[in-house]
Image: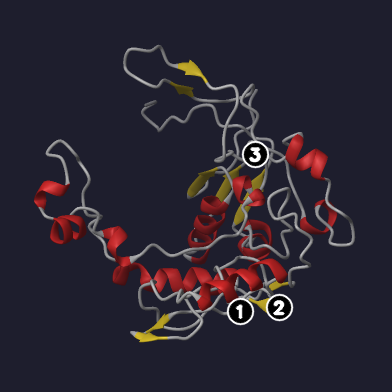
Amino acid sequence: MATKLPPVDALLVGFGWTGALLGQELTDAGLNVLALERGGWRDTTTDFATTFVQDELRYYYRHALFQEPARETLSFRNSTNETALPMRQLGSFLPGTGVGGAGIHWNGQNWRFLPSDFLARSHNTDRYGAAALPQDMTVQDWGVTYDDLEPYYDKWEYLCGISGKAGNIKGQMQPGGNPFEGPRVRDYPNPPMEMTYGPTLFAEGAKDIGLKPFPAPSANMSRAYTNPLGVQLGPCTYCGFCEKVRLWELLQGESSDHYPAGFASQEELRAQDRVRSHQDQPGQ
């Protein structure tokens, strides 16, 4: 006979960035939350200790961080005349598996969308005329603007401890920052990462021809940082394994960012639990 467990207020399917963020918000609101993750458990100190060299063969080439297409994939076709077939090899957007999801192998690039990105139709028609977009093109404005989302961009950056240099603070242009970005209320919480000889030389050459190079915003910690949740984050060791496996206490990820704070008394995470289907009370 099946064991019937007590009900919960919210069920999260998957525990990557989305699950971690939602779990934090829901438990803060006083709800009881259960998160089910199809892959295995991971822990920063035991799985990705900074005192050990990371296993490039295991994590990158043997795909220990990724969902294998042989286990679960999607179908694809190039035109409506073809039969959609399962993809056997995936490209750059590799789905993750296990606690942390695809965020575990996130390279840490952390750009904001431009204000014009939210106005995909009106910005282009105002600038290039109505004829610039074909009549059958369905592109639309988002319905929300950069200004609507700016407070949430700011919250995210301080939660993750993003390293970078602002170029536009409240409409005032800042030397050395991104001259193209929309206005922000304050600078990044951490200074930019140290640049090696290559990008430093490239930046000098770009300046010599009148361009305005700037350091890319990065979810690597350029220094030790404690985020608004009280989670302590260590500085980057410049080991070069941002893609092979992201060090959770260095490169901002779900484990360092949300797991310690998110595991409140009213939240439970179960690994190795795959959800095949979900039915509501009427059985739908």
Q: Name which of mark 1 and mark 2 comes first in the sequence.
A: 1
With respect to residue 62, does 150 lie above or below? below
* Quadrant in which the N terminus is drawn: top right
Residue that appears at 60% across and 46% down? 102
Query: What's the mark number on residue 223?
Result: 2
Q: Are marks 1 and 2 in contact (CB under 8 Å)?
A: yes
Amino acid carrying mark 1 in the image: Asn
For marks 2 and 3, give the one nearer the viewer: 2
Residue placed under numbered mark 3 in the picture:
97
Residue that appears at 54% across and 56% down? 23
Residue 252 screen position, x and y as percent? 64, 63
* Quadrant in which the C terminus is drawn: top left
Residue that appears at 55% across and 69% down? 217
Name the secondary structure under disc 3.
loop
Amino acid carrying mark 2 in the image: Arg
How far is the residue under mark 2 from the one under mark 3? 29 Å
Answer with the quarter of the image where residue 204 lies. bottom right
With respect to residue 117, does 40 lie above or below? above
Residue 219 screen position, x and y as percent? 61, 65
Say few, some or many: other residues with alpha carbon within 10 Å of mark 3 (under 14 / 14 to 19 / 20 or more). many
Q: Is residue 162 visible?
A: no
Amino acid carrying mark 3 in the image: Thr
Q: Name which of mark 1 and mark 3 comes first in the sequence.
A: 3
Residue placed under numbered mark 1 in the picture:
190
Say few, some or many: other residues with alpha carbon within 10 Å of mark 1 (under 14 / 14 to 19 / 20 or more). many
Residue 280 screen position, x and y as percent? 40, 33
Left or right: residue 173 versus residue 22 is: left
Q: Is residue 214 visible?
A: yes
Front in this rendered view, residue 126 or 244: 126
